[in-house]
Amino acid sequence: MQMMIADQFTESISGERTRIINPADGKPAGEVPKGGKEDVDRAVMAAGDAFRRWSVLPTSRRGMIFWQSAALIRREADRLALILTTEQGKPLREAKDEVLGAAAVFEYYAGSASLVSAGYTDRLPRYGYGIIQRRPLGVCGAIIPWNMPVLIAAWKIGAALITGNTLVLKPSINAPMAVLAVGEVMIRSGLPPGVLNIITGNGRDAGDPLIAHPDVRKISFTGGIETGEHVARVTARTIKRLTLELGGNDPMIICSDMDPAMMADAALRLRLYNAGQICTSPKRIIVEEGIYDTFTTHLERLLRDVTVGDGTDPGSMMGPLNNAEVRRSVEDAVQTLRDEGATIIRGGKNEEFPKNGFFYNPVLCTGVPEDSRIHAEEIFGPVLPIIRADDLDDAIGIANDTQYGLGASIWTRDISAAERASEALEAGIIWVNQHMKLPPEVPFGGIKKSGFGRENGLAFIDAYTEEKTILINR
């Protein structure tokens, strides 16, 4: 698997390599170059050289490369999904969903190529003529996490490249191989050298030099709040454009007019998708008093049949967590809930799991106190805290009582209740009778400490271009 910097070098300048671990068994899944500052400098230089040619290419030509890349990704979806499962841990069916989602994102950007306008001209009385030009920014940088690496990479690659920019992309060192494979697919689809550059390295050695580089005009970062604050401080020194998506603590409000058995099934499927390691996963399940007890009983019954195992096993409903640090943070969160007086009905560690894998049984928790830390802190794993609400107003108050504001969902048959909740909930995206669906046609991003800026939709045009005004007096 190649590291693509400049002429697709297969090694970092240091010659060192990093071993990638399979979270299901702790065995090596592969190796990637250990990139550092010199590799970032070389990648930014290559991107700068390529920008002069790529930025003047007709958008239809750029779009054609994305069409071809999407077609090749679909054709090789099984291969790419296996790479993703091996390094990330999710079941193969989920990995394939993600890979096909990335293909859909590339198709969206290919179809949006004609919307990337070069600008417009207007006659202005008393001023003459005004020419408004829209131009790409230049070399952009992106840093992505390990939880949905292929899909999030596609968001950032598509937006940056279709608008005429070039990109230096740093995936998480915990899951870089599938992203490298997608980059290789794009090269085979006709992407010129230097347009997309992928650096594999850790945050200190590769991430920090990228966000601080004076020739990088924009950074798009997806990750945690603490790291996002660091990125904001560093990029401010060179006045870079910045997009931050910093996670979420999404509420899922279930009204008493819904069928409790159906909602228990929905909550389980949504929360256990990718072992709960998704920013928009429903992390706080808020249930109205009228169906709380019945809902909880159904959910406990469903949990008994959940199979946790290797993602390559077709019988596994949920795979392992990605790494030891994540599992430790989930264990700490569950212990905190116990200390606060909540009831852990079932779940947690299981001695029958392979010792070298990062497995963890889903946890069902009730009796969560109003001042619990789960309202302030994101649990990035398969924990289902069920919170009782007196009515819809109470549920909305609980939902908004968090520093996050990425997504939220309201489940009800009452359209007026859905409208009221949609207006009152503090989040960047509100779902009604669904959760986590993110078509590339709509803008995505958060408010409060979930970050700022939007990805996808038509927001990408403003995010990755700048306007120049020329006034002509004849």
Image: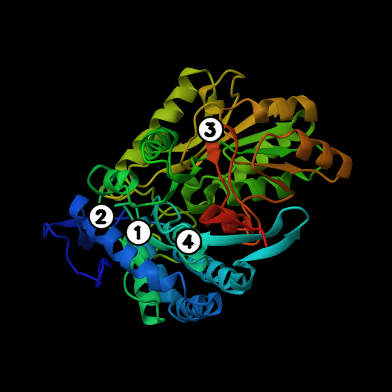
Q: Mark 3 points at which residue?
A: 449
Toward which corner of the image does residue 423 lie, by quadrant? top right
Q: What element carries label 1?
A: strand
- Point out the image quarter for the N terminus: bottom left
* 350 vs 334: above or below: below
Q: Are marks 4 and 3 in contact (CB under 8 Å)?
A: no
At x 43% / y 51%, what residue is drawn? 147
Q: Which mark is residue 156?
A: none
Which secondary structure lies at badge 4? helix
* Pointer 4 residue: 160
x and y, in percent, of residue 370 in the image: 62, 19
**Picture layout, residue 395 above or below residue 275:** above
Which is more N-terminal, label 1 or label 3?
A: 1
> Whole-Å distance between the Cαs marked 4 and 1?
10 Å
- The crowd level at tag 4 (other Cα within 10 Å; few <14, some 14-19, many 20+) is many
Separation of marks 2 and 1 at Cα, in angstroms: 8 Å
The residue drawn where x is 74% and y is 61% is 123
Q: Provide the residue designation for mark 1.
A: 168
Q: How far apart are marks 4 and 3 (CA)?
A: 24 Å
Q: Give residue 177's quadrant in the image.
A: bottom left
Q: Earlier in the sequence, mark 2 or mark 3?
A: 2
Circle 1: residue type: Val
> Three-letter amino acid code at disc 3?
Lys
Q: Residue at x 22, y 46 (%)?
A: 205
Packing grade of label 2 (10 A; few <14, some 14-19, many >=20) is many
- The residue under the point 60% across, 39% down is 250
Viewer-proximal residue among 470 and 400: 470
